[in-house]
Image (spheres, grey):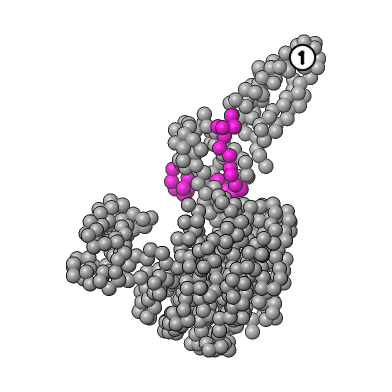
Amino acid sequence: MTKIDKTDLENIKLIIKESKINSVAKIKIKKNDYEIEITSNDFVENNVSVQKIEKKSEVKEVENTNEVINEDNIVKSPMVGVAYLSADPNSQPYVKVGQHVKAGDTLLLIEAMKTFNEIKAPRSAIIKKIVTLNSQPVEYGDTLIIFE
Amino acid sequence: MFKKILIANRGEIALRVLRACRELGINTVAIHSDVDENAMHVRMADESICVGPASAQSSYLNIPAIITAATLTDADAIHPGYGFLSENQRFAEIIEEHNIKFIGPKSEHIKMMGNKIDAKKIMDQTGVPIVKGINDLSDKNKIEEFIKKVKYPIIVKAASGGGGKGMRIVTEEDDLNKAINEAKLEAKKSFNDENVYLEKFLTSPKHIEIQVLCDSFGNVVTLGERDCSIQRKHQKLIEESPSSVLTNENREKISELCRKSMKKIGYEGVGTLEFLYENNEFYFMEMNTRLQVEHPVTEMVTGIDLVKEQILVANGEKLTIKQEDIKLKGSSIECRINAEHPESFIPSPGKITQYHQPGGLGIRVDSAVYDGYSIPSHYDSMIGKLITYGATRSEALKKMNRALEEYVIMGINTNIQLHQKIIQTDEFKRGSYNINFMSNLIE
């Protein structure tokens, strides 16, 4: 199960604010190939031209969201297991938000079937967000870390 | 005879023990974690008890919960299988304190072999060959004498070392002093201890192990060897018996030394002495005081059920098998089937959506998975063992090739393709492979 996180809520708020709608009828979030769909009765009540503009802005916002979390900036889990942010409970986490990492640096560990697998940075980047929590179960394809 | 045995394990080995118990007319108790509720070992046992949540630490390694389960079900013995608590000296002691028989060696022997340095010392004292070394490097003449005896290559190792730090391999005399000095410097920096020692370095050894079976009356038999040189990151992948490089004379010589040593220390139960083997010489590494994963290849070539024998000697019975009756007949190979990607080795737990296991003459599959079974991510990735037997090695190999082709496991990744790749190499076909095989293959 993928969870709704803070970013989703922020994105929804942003879309609602930017599209200047007063009431929301339906919100849909799809996690793979990230997608947010917001339906509002405002669109139906307003005249056709406004509706069109509003819809355009909605589409634009979804695109923006995709830009903010570009696929290339997401480090996904390659396996099912338990994520660990540090080598052992007493040591410092591998990475912190805002830290610059080089390609090949260890970002976190995933324990699966008795083996600890190092998840390495695919490229050099700055850590924007650490999505996974320490000792939290992760599924295949779950977002672990987001780069700037 | 035991009336009820609690099996403190899961997966294929729990099934293996359960099957032996059935044939001996002993009732079984399975323990399981909450995610293993639908596991095959639970389904097939006479009784089952949940001992905790998914993490092994809180279930299969949870000593108080396991003892409680044994007491509640009135089990008179516990079989630990391999892994988990099988080599935990404290567990063996606690069980005995509760008047339940631990199916394994005495706790003192688990302790003795648990410390690798002590184990080597004891083996050396009882006449088993170990890797020759010299600790005192202050006397130049002694070093020279040592090298004359063991010959180059030599390895310099840090006394408090690990992870390759403070290690130097020396192939000729001219480099010796330089290597010792460099290793000392590195050891001082890394471990704040500049003590180093020399050891004979084995460049391309085989991993060969000897199976022993001992009763409580001092009777000891050996059941030939297993060649387990196909390993990746110290995890065995393929094992076979007999090894194609061992002569009868060599086999008999090392087996005799193992029997003498086991008699001397008064060992009981099944056990395995692991050696490195190079240029017709054996070097003791460690002893496993339990049943091994790869025990089936020995069973196939000797016709002896090791688990039944293990239970019988734990029950205080005298061995009925005589050394002269043990003959290695034919050839057997085992492939460990792991739920992992055949190239990236990424673990692959999940649901098996389609399952067909190979069969026919000379094919044995020891596995606890079934169609629709979900492999949990909390435990080892080994989901089964495919064992073949043939009158000759080439026949066993042909059967393995056919069986791997026939094996269907859908829904998860398995290393079946890797096994196919390995057994089709010339080196494997010849049987001359050594412990460097996997790193050479992957590179």
Asked which quadrant contains residue B139, the reply is bottom left
Q: Which residue is mark 1?
A: A51
Chain ID of residue with mark 1: A
Left or right of B44? Residue B413 is: left
Taking the spot 24% from the left edge, 58% from the top edge, the residue there is B175
Q: Is residue B70 visible?
A: no
Magenta stretch bounds = A69-94
- Direction from residue A40 to residue B62 in the image, left or right: left
Residue B206 in view, yes or no: yes
Q: Position of residue B124 (x, y in %)?
A: 36, 77
Along the line of sight, the residue nearer the viewer: B315 or A65: A65
- Asked which secondary structure carries label 1, the reply is helix
Which residue is at a point 36% across and 55% down the rendered structure image? Answer: B164
The residue depicted at 77 percent of the width and 10 percent of the height is A49
Residue B203, how many percent across, how many down? 38, 63
Give coordinates of residue A3: x percent, y percent.
Answer: 65, 38
- Figure check: B239 above or below A91: below
Quarter of the figure that contains the N terminus of chain A: top right
Q: Badge 1 local density, few (<14 within 10 Å), some, or many (20+)?
A: some
> Residue B13 location, x and y as percent?
62, 68
Q: Is residue B418 in the magenta section?
A: no
Residue depicted at x 39% and y 74%: B281
Which amino acid lies under the numbered mark 1 shown in the image of this protein? Gln
